[in-house]
């Protein structure tokens, strides 16, 4: 069968962003329905809270401060809860106790690119945070995610304990802002066509069909 030529699909995302998790779930569902999709998926750094303390903050404190009180926090997640229920996406927000600094999670995603395992790591981060309520700012959690994806966990543990690629990953975050990206998820096709938000599976299927027709 003819192999479809690949095109880059960059995903600017933060693993603590619920819309990023929802959006990637929709994309995955589309890809599972296509035998030979055209996308070369590349995950890019975007931190929602680049100034977050290294050990994170209490989740409820964070939400109340970010959304101007408990009611604002609840309203802000109304859309998330609606999508989760309607689309049967696994998410247990009540399990999340801390909002982490995601720099190290992004470092892990950055390293995963060298092994072509970014999707596995992204899924591992989303599942750990949104389903299991784990603190993905903690090295031991990241090492476990890496181990499940088939990485040398001893090497990852050593890398996380160092400052390896901290500056480079931080520069990726700044580059995203320089490109005009202000919210996530943002998807960029072929380095030039960008769109933001959690796109429904049906839209991805139509896009894939349109792209493959032109190839």
Image: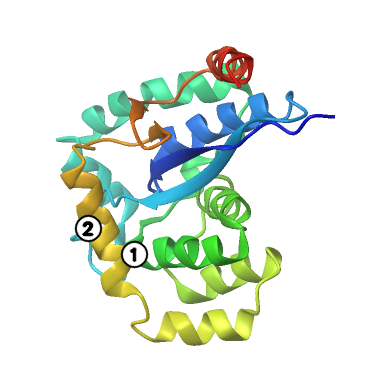
Q: Which residue is mark 2?
A: 50
Instruction: Name the side, left or right, on which 57 lies relative to 114.
Output: left
Residue occupying image coordinates x 27% and y 33% = 73
**In the picture shown, does residue 60 fall above or below 2?**
below
Residue 15 appears in the picture as rendered? no
Quadrant (top left/top right/bottom left/bottom right) for the N terminus: top right
- Residue closest to the eye, 72 or 197: 197
The residue most toward the right is 1
Give the Cα distance between marks 2 and 1: 8 Å
Q: Residues within 10 Å of mark 1 (few under 14, many from 20)?
A: many
- Residue closest to the eye, 165 or 52: 165
Give the mark, 2 or 1, whose residue is nearer the N terminus.
2
Element at label 2: loop
Residue occupying image coordinates x 63% and y 53% = 120
Instruction: Name the side, left or right, on which 142 lies relative to 97.
Output: right
**In the picture shown, does residue 161 fall above or below 18?**
below
Q: Which residue is mark 1?
A: 103
Residue 4 locus on image (x, y percent) = 69, 31
Quadrant (top left/top right/bottom left/bottom right) for the C terminus: top right
Residue occupying image coordinates x 36% and y 60% = 102
Residue 99 locus on image (x, y percent) = 34, 55
Residue 168 appears in the picture as rendered? yes
């Amino acid at each position: 069968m003819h192999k479809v030529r690949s095109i880059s699909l960059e995903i600017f995302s933060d693993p603590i962003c619920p819309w990023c998790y929802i959006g990637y779930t929709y994309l995955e569902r589309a890809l599972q329905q296509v035998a030979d999709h055209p996308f070369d998926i590349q995950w890019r750094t975007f931190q929602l809270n680049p100034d977050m303390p290294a050990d994170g903050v209490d989740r409820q404190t964070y939400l109340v401060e970010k959304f101007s009180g408990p009611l604002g926090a609840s309203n802000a997640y109304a859309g998330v809860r609606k999508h989760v229920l309607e689309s049967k996406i696994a998410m247990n927000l009540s399990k999340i106790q801390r909002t982490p600094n995601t720099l190290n999670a992004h470092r892990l995603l950055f390293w995963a690119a060298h092994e072509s395992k970014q999707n596995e790591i992204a899924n591992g981060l989303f599942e750990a945070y949104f389903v299991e309520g784990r603190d993905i700012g903690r090295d031991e959690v990241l090492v476990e995610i890496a181990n499940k994806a088939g990485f040398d966990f001893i090497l990852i543990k050593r890398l996380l304990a160092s400052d390896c690629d901290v500056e480079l990953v931080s520069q990726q975050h700044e580059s995203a802002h320089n490109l005009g990206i202000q919210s996530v998820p943002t998807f960029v096709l072929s380095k030039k066509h960008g769109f933001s938000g959690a796109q429904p599976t049906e839209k991805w299927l139509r896009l894939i069909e349109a792209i493959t027709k032109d190839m």
